[in-house]
Amino acid sequence: MTPGRVAATPEDRTTGYLPGVATAPLTITILEGDETGQELLEQALRVLEPDVVGLPIVLERFDLSLERRRETGNQIVHDAAAAMRASGLGIKAATITPEGKDDVGSPNRIVREGVDGKVIIRTGRRIPGVTPIAGVYLPISVVRMAVDDAYGAKQWREGPEGGADEIAYRTEKITRGTCAAVAEYAFRTAKKMGGKVYGGPKWTVSPVYEGMLKEELDAAAQRHPDVWYQPVLIDATYAGLVSGAADSPLVIPALNRDGDCLSDLVMPMFGSIAGAESVLLAFDEDFTTQVAMAEAPHGTAPALLGKDIANPMAMILACGAVLNYAADRGLPGAERASRAIYESVLEATATGVRTPDLGGHSSTSEFTTDVIGRVRTKLDVWSSLGTTV
């Protein structure tokens, strides 16, 4: 066989491989996790099997379980981040963050800093067959800082411990570069969605600190005059989300902690925090994506460990998201496979295939198996019709 070419079986020809066409393997860095987070990852990765999506995918695995992080003093996390910088693509399972100040802490901060991640985007979208709250039907994307702000801030206390006069301090920072990345990506996303950039920080109370993000949003609005821009203070943003402001697709730019809180509000508005993926992005100077790491926004759910009832939607959609970014890199068939995954997940819920958190009776593995069958069928049909989708 000619070097650089991948053999094609008859099944491959219906799902993406083309005989005699050079197709380099796609490497995706896999960050394994803890408890139910790891179980959901293993289920979701079934969707990326070559005989399902028709793509030559290589999974490069790193064990980010709490035990392994402690054993290596977090070196495994640094190694995973370095590998993801090289591959440009990653999928991460939920991990445990221990509470002790002298423990290994959260791997998320190390990963984000290791790949120079600037933005996290989470998009709530209507789940067919599930009634959202507050009349929300159109997508809502929260675009938040991935670094800086309250996370990683310097903290200390002064005064008599436990006394009424003990004082706690925190020194936070944000950089203009991170603010610019959030602002620019928010406007580009709104343009793709046909929606508006809505919300913002509390710039009236904090014109120096939070005002920096507002300045970059205003500058981005000048660069994108065709995008609807409605700046709203963060507290009014929360009120608007539950009182009808989502009359069009929304993109909400936010500081790091504000965005974290907003995401945990927006996701359940559509039915479940496990209903959509989260993506960490790193850019070059032109805001072209250099690294995309997708994950589920929920935690490790220890109460569901081993019960095969957790909702795998977010993890499966994370796989679809990574393929979408792979398509931006020019991988043949990646965009089609990504769309097949997204459509199959939502079609499954529309037909009543749902886990208990969405009022259904399907197990984690049953839901995943159903999605896999739909993905295979879609790719087969699209190939038969000769459509590139």
Image: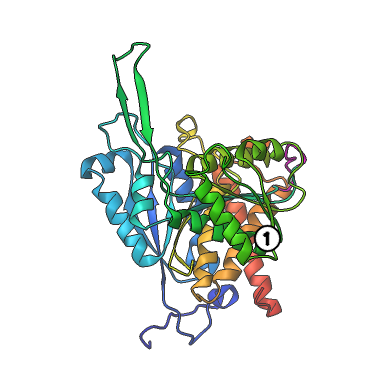
Q: Mark 1 falls on what kind of element?
A: helix
Identity of the amino acid at label 1? Met
Q: Is residue 129 magenta?
A: yes
The extreme top residue here reads 163
As drawn, 237 above or below 164? below
Q: Residue at x 26, y 45 (%)?
A: 74
Report x, y in % for residue 364.
Answer: 55, 43
The front one of 110 and 365 is: 110
Q: Residue at x 68, y 77 (%)?
A: 387
What secondary structure is the magenta-colored segment mainly? loop
Q: Residue at x 61, y 39 (%)?
A: 234
Residue topped by disc 1: 193
Report x, y in % for residue 378.
Answer: 66, 66
- Which quarter of the image is occupied by the N terminus? bottom left
Q: Which residues are magenta?
A: 127-135
Report x, y in % for residue 100.
Answer: 30, 29
